[in-house]
Image: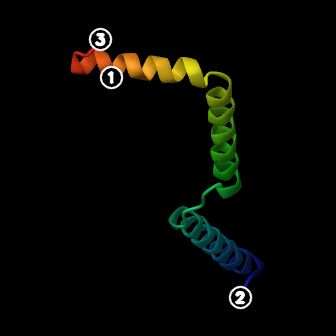
Amino acid sequence: MTVIAKLQVRTVRAVQALQERIDDADNRERGDVPGWVLITIMTAGLVTVLWATAQDALTTLFSSAVNGVTGKK
């Protein structure tokens, strides 16, 4: 086998191996679990802080909205 033939075989094998790695990467689902956990915790924290600081106003707003829909005054 000549040097060029050997290089061609190695190149074809390398391309096939690379294609298999790309195909495997496309088929796997990957999620950013720590990112989602952080977003969920930060959202819960923001809701807690907002609710603690504006509880009276939010309760009044909700009550008046429900009373407006049901027709009570």
Instruction: Name the disc covering residue 73, or none.
Output: 3
User: Mark 1 highlights which residue?
Assistant: 66
Count up the numbered dots: 3
Name the spot of residue 56 as percent of width and height, x first: 57, 21
If the image is split into quadrants, where does the C terminus sit? top left
Dot 2: what SS?
loop
Residue sticking out furthest to the bottom? 1
Q: Is residue 46 above or below residue 53?
A: below
Residue type (three-letter) at the residue carrying disc 2: Met
Are discs 3 and 1 less than 8 Å apart at CB?
Answer: no
**Which amino acid type is marked by label 3?**
Lys
Q: Nearer the viewer, mark 3 or mark 1?
A: 3
| Dot 2 alpha-carbon crowd within 10 angstroms: few under 14, some 14 to 19, many 20 or more | few
Q: Which residue is mark 2?
A: 1
Task: Residue type at mark 1: give it.
Answer: Val
Q: In the image shown, does 70 or 22 lie closer to the viewer?
A: 70
Query: CA–CA distance between discs 3 and 2?
Result: 95 Å
Q: Looking at the picture, how far across and down is residue 55, in whole percent?
A: 59, 25
Judged by depth in the image, the label closer to the viewer, 1 or 2, is 1
Give the image's coloring scheme.
Answer: rainbow
| Marks 1/2: CA–CA distance | 85 Å
